Image (cartoon, rainbow, N blue to C red):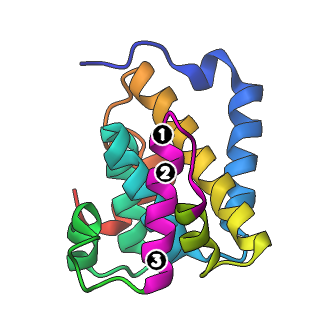
Amino acid sequence: MSQRINYIQQTPELFRKYQEFSAAIRISSLGDALIDLVQIRASQLNGCAFCLDMHVKEAKIHGERELRLHHVAIWRESKLFSERERAALLWTEALTRLPTEGVNDDLFDKARAHFSDKELSELSFAIMAINGWNRLSIGFAAEPGSADAAYGLDRAGLN
């Protein structure tokens, strides 16, 4: 399937602002490794091939181990993630899937045990950002790998 609409060309100012928002998240206190895991997991849950492809390559560039990348989908069973990373992945799933009854206190407390108020807020904005990008990429059928050269993702050596 080819891309339906080039939303970057059609709404360059909105794209730029959303990109600035996403870049601001990258300079938060969370660090690249945690943000990469969150972006990969949300993209898996949403079925966004373009974003999953992009964020796996980014994580590889940031030094993430390949086995951990393969284990993101099975993070509950894997021993490769810290308790903090597990809390972030749990929070990512909750905010990406949004249960009809809302996010319960137990789940919130599990995330809160590993993050300060500021960090949990930053994490929530990171989850919000990737979910938005997933919706754009899925809706307009962005082709996985099509932005590799533009974003320097060919450095990951995964093509």
Identify the magenta region. 83-105
Q: Which residue is mark 1?
A: 99
Q: Quadrant of residue 139?
A: top left
Marked residue nearer the N-terminal end (2 or 3)? 3
Kindly identify the amino acid type of the residue bearing the numbered disc 2: Ala
Q: Are marks 2 and 1 in contact (CB under 8 Å)?
A: yes
Q: Quadrant of residue 28?
A: bottom right
Kindly identify the amino acid type of the residue bearing the numbered disc 1: Pro
Could you tell me how far apart the alpha carbons at marks 2 and 3 are, in whole angstroms? 14 Å
Residue 40 screen position, x and y as percent: 39, 57
Q: Quadrant of residue 65?
A: bottom left
Q: Which residue is mark 3?
A: 85
Q: Indicate left or right for 22 with 33 as reference.
A: right
The image shows residue 50, relative to residue 4, as above or below, that is below
User: Judging from the image, what secondary structure is the residue with disc 2 in?
Assistant: helix
Q: Indicate left or right for 81 with 68 as reference.
A: right
Q: Residue at x 37, y 19 (%)?
A: 3
State the mark number for residue 69: none
Q: Which residue is mark 2?
A: 94
Residue 92 shown in magenta:
yes
The image shows residue 68, relative to residue 42, as above or below, that is below
Kindly identify the amino acid type of the residue bearing the numbered disc 3: Glu
Name the front one of labels 2 and 3.
2
Marked residue nearer the N-terminal end (3 or 1)? 3
